[in-house]
Amino acid sequence: MVDENTNGAQMNSYVERGGLFWTGKVGSIGGGYVSWPFGTLVVTSERLRFSVKTWRWFASIWALDPAFQAEPVFQVEKSQIQSISKKRGLFSKGLAFQQSNPEYPTRIVFWTFNYPTLSNALRHFGYDVVDT
């Protein structure tokens, strides 16, 4: 569901908190994972923004990738999204995003407790979501 402002006009983004998993960039090792509520996905018609908010001291302890940023942000343009597909977990569902920006991980998974709302919001902003 897309939020509406007080004038009834639709907002230009959808924001959801959830879990976030990513693999290392092409040619590197590592990656990362944070559980709810430390991952955030912002959806607009132009781009997707994945971000992590943690305690900096904690993030530095569990980082596997030497180039890991304490609070990474992956901002992927719509044209760089190659596919979005449903992913099933033990207690939640998620969306696996394949993307082509060489600066970011090629695969990012966002875990949500509200899959129908998130997938509908992505479709509302023009993204193709494969429900398999």
Image (cartoon, rainbow, N blue to C red):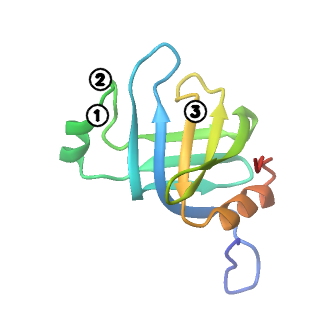
The residue identified by callout 2 is: 66
If the image is split into quadrants, where does the N terminus sit? bottom right
Q: Disc number at residue 120?
A: none
Q: Is residue 35 left or right of residue 100?
A: left
Density class for disc 1 (Cα within 10 Å; few <14, some 14-19, many ≥20) is some
Q: Disc number at residue 107?
A: 3
Q: Is residue 64 above or below residue 36?
A: above
Q: Secondary structure at mark 3?
A: strand
Mark toward the start of the polypeptide (1 vs 3): 1
Density class for disc 3 (Cα within 10 Å; few <14, some 14-19, many ≥20) is many
Nearest the viewer among 44 and 108 is 108
The x, y position of residue 115, in whole percent, is 64, 62
Q: Quadrant of residue 59?
A: top left
The residue identified by callout 1 is: 63
The x, y position of residue 48, in whole percent, is 63, 47
The x, y position of residue 49, in whole percent, is 57, 47
Residue type marked 2: Pro
Residue type marked 3: Arg
Q: Quadrant of residue 81?
A: top right
Q: Secondary structure at mark 2?
A: loop
Contact between labelled residues 3 and 1, with CB atoms less than 8 Å apart? no
Residue depicted at 67% across the width and 75% down the height: 3
Residue depicted at 49% across the width and 23% down the height: 25
